[in-house]
Amino acid sequence: MGWDQPARDSLFRLAKGLKVGENHLRDLMDWLEEIALRDQSTIEEILAGKPITDIESDPRLGRADKLKRVKEELRRLRFPRLAQMEDSIRARIQELKLHPEIRLTVPPGLEGGKLRVELSAANPEGLKRLTGKLAEAADTNTVREIFALLAGEAVESRPKSDHFFRG
Amino acid sequence: MQLFQPEEVIVERGSEASPIYRNLRNRLPLIPFRTVDAVSTENGRTDFSASTFGAAKKRLFLTRHKGEFLKKCPGSDGQICCNYFVINFASNCPMDCSYCYLQEYLADNPELKVFSNVDDLLTEAEELLTNHRRFFFRIGTGEITDSLALDPYIGFAREVVPFFAEQPNVLLELKTKSDCVEGLLVLDPKDRVVVSWSMNPQRVIDLDEHGTASLSERLLAARRCQDAGYRLGFHFDPIVEYSNWEGDYEDMVDQTFCSVDWRRIAWLSMGVLRDTPSLKRIIRDRFPRTQLLTGEQVLCPDGKLRYFQPMRVDIYRKMLCWIRRAAPTVKVYLCMESKEVWEQVFGFAPICEKELGNQMAPSL
């Protein structure tokens, strides 16, 4: 892949420390290359960045957790606007403060533009109660904003900026 | 545009009687010609490599096509398609766009080939069109090649346009990134031929559409074709997202509609950059510095990588707004997109490919 020695050494150090398997390694290598190309930086600079080194040096995290977090951090670096949009949707879902038995999720990559709803009910009354809560939530601006984001529409900025596409 | 010139033309024995051969001989007097018994023995290559694909474009093979010329466009799983047919009169393309899917599709068969048996092609087309006069067909020639980039040498347009011009139930589309339209200007298309251009801002052309005509050359060629009686098409595809893409694409759309009479445009299409994980590896090998691979593309259900959905819906909406500002009623469609994206962009989606295909025909 044309990686120079410092890049290989950086990745090797990370991969050895976290015992990264082949599939994860492939993803990490692709993302690192693409981030470096996009940002005109180097792979060793990316891996030496604070977000990655903080995770690596956190004594509270086991190896598997570290790998998961490093990968997520690199994914967010690689797909910044997608990550920001996912965060924004997730924040709005949390704002709804729905019952734990109502689960709202969006598909990977936001493909399909749909919100997935899962209800866990033990009896008809429970189901009726949950669907009632869901119906109330559907009437809120927050849910309208979630669908607007999924549909690629500009949405009012929140304190943590989520103004992706200027209309 | 710098015209492509092969280093050598390799002719399969039996193709010498073809008008394509005569045209090649007349127009490439200084290029060596070699006759062989079978083109397949000349390939001399077993494994694809990045350098092989590029090298394969330097020689031109003239050979008989042994299969069917005419087939349905393959489209993409689960996406709305436009009921298009394709004629493959050649295989591979003398140009070298970084994102070209032929790098993957023709990886095992990259030789630049032109098929000599045009008469078989026309016989097949005639059979389809005369046996199904109650159906309207859109047939394109640019699926696995550029429709016009080789025309200065092979004179394909002169062999086929007069035939299609006389058919009442067809539109022939010649899709190109070249400005090689001289051969068309002396022919009368009788409203049966659409010449269309794949379009991108000059910045994208410079970085990733190697060997193609510039934006202004394409637009000048379009104008010349329109003045000669051809209908036009434009394919804003692939749309590449980058910092300040809006400014560049808006300018390109404006330039397009300043250059031609939009009322005689048959159709416009839009499609964002698409690739597959394996094509991405090929692109990375052949064009390691291209920025195309740094976009926020995700894997979609049909196995293709595209910008994530909200981003591409935003792109399409903006493009549509600029198009409509200049050409309020021109037919616009999306290439290889899902029903959901259609609905988000247009507010509706065609029920099926036949509906979309039928919507194109009445554009005449």
Image (cartoon, coloured by chain):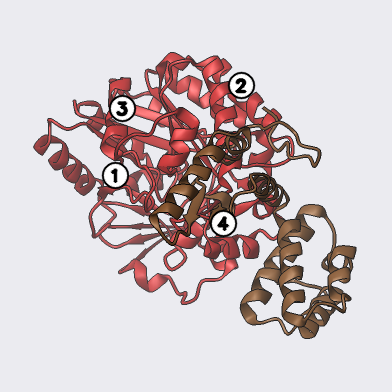
Q: Which residue is mark 1?
A: B19
Label 1: which secondary element: helix
Q: Which residue is mark 3?
A: B359
Q: Earlier in the sequence, mark 2 or mark 3?
A: 2
What is the display colour for chain A?
brown
Task: Output the letter for the chain in red.
Answer: B
Q: The residue under label 1 is which amino acid type?
A: Pro
Q: The residue under label 3 is which amino acid type?
A: Gln
Discs 1 and 3 lie in a common subunit:
yes
Measure how far apart labels 1 and 3 are at the Cα level: 36 Å
How many residues crowd around disc 2 within 10 Å: few (fewer than 14), some, or many (20 or more)?
some
Q: Earlier in the sequence, mark 2 or mark 1?
A: 1
Instruction: From the viewer's side, name the closer residue of B215 and A116.
Output: A116
Q: Nearer the viewer, mark 4 or mark 3?
A: 4
Q: Which residue is mark 2?
A: B255
Q: Nearer the viewer, mark 1 or mark 3?
A: 3
